[in-house]
Image (cartoon, helix red, strand yellow):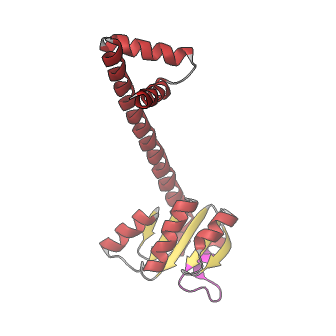
Amino acid sequence: MDIMLVSDCIEGDHPVAEAAERAACRVIKQVGPNDEAAHYVERMRPDALVVVSDEMDRAILRELRAVKSINPLPVLVFTRDGRPESIDVAVRAGASSYIVDCSDLDRLKPLLEVATARFREQQRLESELDSTKQALEGRKAVDRAKGILMKQKGMSEDEAYRALRKLAMDRNKKIGEMAEQLIEAADMLM
């Protein structure tokens, strides 16, 4: 596993880099909290990001948010900052795992595996949420299009739905797409 390390201290050999080597991981880049980690993540495409910081300061949180928006990936945070508000903002900024202890780095491999599993689950949930939102928007469009057909053509709700479904099938489109087109056409005519 290729990891990128963001640390308060990038001078000399870093204990996480040494632990990564023992865990058969490779640190492909080591940067400080103000070194635009997101830029390197985008360019180098590591499998995970490991953050080591005494506290969750603005620079670290800014980098986590940038990574999350540019190229989301599993993020494992090691810190001494156990304040609940720090944990909360770090997780919202993109941390997959948050470890308030930097002493036992022999656990790096399983911790990275947990961070990766949590990241994948979060991505799945976000994708499912997006699909649900799109389905709801499609459903709203279908209901609105049915209303237009019912009003303009004097159809019942069932007749309007069947007409909309037939239009979609005849044009090889999804019913939601057809509903959007019907709404747009109706809006232009009004």
In the depicted view, which residue is nearer to us: 115 or 63?
63
- What residue is at 32 percent from the left and 22 percent from the top? 147
158 left or right of 102? Answer: left
- What residue is at 31 percent from the left and 18 percent from the top? 151
Residue 138 is situated, as x and y percent measured from the top left of the image, at 42, 31
Residue 27 is drawn in which quadrant? bottom right
In the depicted view, which residue is nearer to us: 60 or 163?
163
Check the image and name the residue furthest to the bottom: 11
Residue 1 is drawn in which quadrant? bottom right
In the depicted view, which residue is nearer to us: 34 or 15?
34
Q: Which residues are magenta?
A: 7-19
- Residue 81 located within the stretch drawn in magenta: no
Residue 120 is situated, as x and y percent measured from the top left of the image, at 51, 51
Residue 52 to residue 12: above or below: above
- Residue 16 located within the stretch drawn in magenta: yes
136 left or right of 11? Answer: left
Residue 93 to residue 100: above or below: above
Residue 185 is situated, as x and y percent measured from the top left of the image, at 46, 27
- What residue is at 57 percent from the left and 76 percent from the top? 6
Residue 90 is situated, as x and y percent measured from the top left of the image, at 41, 69
- What residue is at 41 percent from the left and 43 percent from the top? 129
Residue 39 to residue 143: above or below: below
Q: Quadrant of the C terminus?
A: top left
